[in-house]
Image: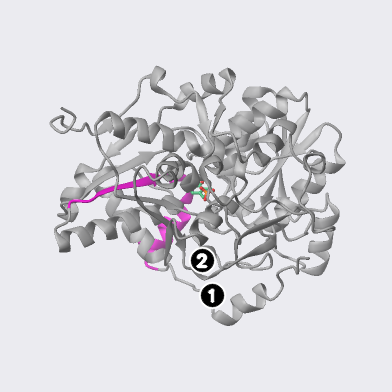
Amino acid sequence: MAEQQKIPYKIYLDEDEMPENWYNVRADMKKKPAPLLNPGTGKPMAAEELEAVFCRDLVQQELNNDDRLIPIPEEIREFYKMYRPSPLVRAYCLEKKLGTPAKIYYKFEGNNTSGSHKLNSAIAQAYYAKKQGLRGVTTETGAGQWGTALSMACAYMGLDLKVFMVKCSYEQKPFRREVMRTYGADVTPSPSMKTEVGRKMNEEFPGTTGSLGCAISEAVETAVKTPGYRYVLGSVLNQVLLHQSVIGEETMTAMDKYGVKPDIIIGCAGGGSNLGGLISPFMGRKLRGEADYDIVAVEPASCPSFTRGKFAYDFCDTGHVCPLAKMYTLGSEFIPSANHAGGLRYHGMSPILSELYDEGLMRAVSYEQTSVFQAAEEFCRCEGILPAPESSHAIRAAMDEAIRCRETGEEKTILFGLTGTGYFDMYAYQQFNDGTMTDSIPTDEELERSLAKLPVIG
Ligand SMILES: *Cc1c(COP(=O)(O)O)cnc(C)c1O
């Protein structure tokens, strides 16, 4: 029956088909992701140590390797209903344009004011901070999407929010900053003079325009020193992948409803949260031996954590105030060149995805930004949506798979995550349209230099 049904352009779920639990892929992993370590002692971080920095319930989720399903609190489900379920779109127009026998689907997460999937975790983190009776939270933001999503979530929950925004973005993206301020966030360019880490950076590197690693250090320092505050992070952590599993759960329910099975699942990878969320339930089936999928992470050639990094314990931030995480990394001192996909410029990667990648359960590819923007242009001209540069990495890879199918005649089903819209990235689009966009790939020597500074454990 399902086979005969014409697949609609957009598959929406009913409210009562929306997930009631987050799916925790760690429960199905034989080899669990490595624990966070205390940089001072080299020992796994205990819950009490983590609770000095993070919210209590989120620490429990961070450390929970065993429970497969974790109930989504009613209040969060109510919030989700304001902008979810997100549509699963059959890219009929793109298929036609490419002349491919492949079937292409994308899960679109850009239908909310913050313009990306980050709101799925922001609302959860704000909820648990409020539940703990905190006054506020601190965070960093690079390109601005996470800061925007968290501003919305904190406004809804009635929490204060201090955002450290990487200085070059603060100056280049004034409208992102104003969106955050409109939702009530306090936004400071990083490095600032408000923290020890920031003052030190400004002294050592006068005129520096900052980095994500430094902004994280400033946000953590501020959280630890301000009574009633904790720090929250928008990617990389296990808890964030857990919250983002709503993306994959909705996708799987929608596809199952129409009897569709993806052969290839593709997502862009910065810290790994959207990809981890999209693939989680599918990876669960793969880990349990119920189905197989070709799972692909797409990263920028300018910041190639998976494809050229090392699987090792590393610092998560420049100031070395955060716990150590075992992940694919380029070294915490690696400063990627000015790639326009700001959300993909982190030196490390989710420990969960790192473990899965290391075991060969997924693969990774990298692309230069001009070819990514070519894909974005082709996509928006037929599918209508103006994609974020980050998301366009996944579009590029999906298009290349579909083109391969055209050559081989294979009718594969390709699913990719369209994480957000690119309205705040018009400066990047302008460079692309003017033909002045350049590509930059780190040399082996550059990578060796930053990887030489990985911490020695044990
Ligand atoms: C932040 C962001 C990403 C990358 O972050 P992940 O944690 O790797 O998902 C991708 N796309 C958009 C639109 C983003 O805002």
For label 1, the crowd category at 10 Å Cα-Cα, with few meaning under 14, some 14 to 19 and many 20 or more, is some
Q: CA distance from mark 2 to mark 1?
A: 9 Å
Place of residue 387 in the rendered image (x, y in percent of width and height, measured from the top left): 39, 47
**Residue 304, disc:** 2
Place of residue 80 in the rendered image (x, y in percent of width and height, measured from the top left): 50, 25
Q: Which residues are magenta?
A: 411-435
**Is residue 220 in the magenta section?**
no
Quickly name the residue at label 1: 442
Q: Amino acid at mark 1?
A: Pro
Q: Is residue 38 visible?
A: yes
Give the quarter of the figure containing the N terminus.
top left
What is the secondary structure assignment of the residue under circle 2? loop
Place of residue 305 in the rendered image (x, y in percent of width and height, measured from the top left): 54, 64
Residue drawn 47% across and 21% down?
Answer: 81
Residue drawn 36% across and 42% down?
Answer: 290
Report whether 419 appears left or right of 349: left
Report whether 161 appears left or right of 10: right
Q: Earlier in the sequence, mark 2 or mark 1?
A: 2
Q: Residue 91 is drawn in which quadrant?
A: top left
